Amino acid sequence: DSNTTEEKRRKKTRFVGAYFLLITACQFHLPYYGSRMLPNIMALPLVVHSYAYWFDGNIRLSCSLLVIAAAVFRCDIIILLFTIGLCMLLRRE
């Protein structure tokens, strides 16, 4: 039964990951900002990896990456960290 649960979790994770990739790749301003050295673009890989770790259930690493991104690049990432943290508290993760 645990194999079935693990398989369902993997399918869900793949679906969510593919959906997130599609949303991120389709943003019209990504190529524009990607050609400039701005804090937004420098923080983007950390934030995207943080989401990937969160989707995978590695909450500690997810939060660590968001804290690093907020401290080094953009302090408005603290709002994202707050919303993810609130979601984790509500889901009791």
Image (cartoon, rainbow, N blue to C red):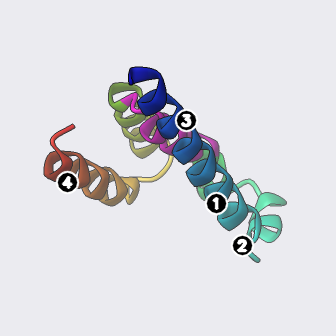
| Mark with earlier residue (1, 3) | 3
> Is the magenta region chiefly helix, strand or loop?
helix
Q: Tell me the SS state at disc 4.
A: helix
Q: Residues within 10 Å of mark 2 (few under 14, many from 20)?
A: few
| Mark with earlier residue (4, 3) | 3
Q: Nearer the viewer, residue 7 or 64?
A: 7
Q: Which mark is residue 10?
A: 3
Residue type at mark 4 is Leu
Q: What residue sits 61% from the left and 52% below the top?
A: 15
Q: Residue 27 carries which label?
A: 2
Mark 4 or mark 3, which is nearer to you? Answer: 3
* Left or right, residue 74 beside residue 64: right
Q: Tell me the SS state at disc 1.
A: helix
The residue range painted magenta reads 45-58
Residue type at mark 2 is Gln
Q: In this view, does 34 lie above or below 68?
A: below
| Mark with earlier residue (3, 2) | 3
Mark 2 and mark 4: Cα distance apart in space: 26 Å
Q: What residue sits 69% from the left and 55% below the top?
A: 21
- Give the residue at mark 4: 86
Q: Which mark is residue 6?
A: none
Mark 3 and mark 2: Cα distance apart in space: 26 Å
Q: Position of residue 19 (x, y in %)?
A: 64, 60
Mark 4 and mark 3: Cα distance apart in space: 24 Å
| Occupied quadrant, residue 11 | top right
Q: How crowded is mark 4: few (under 14 residues within 10 Å), some or many (20 or more)?
A: few
Q: Spot the residue most to the bottom.
A: 28
Q: Position of residue 73 (x, y in %)?
A: 50, 46
Mark 1 and mark 3: Cα distance apart in space: 14 Å
- Give the residue at mark 1: 19
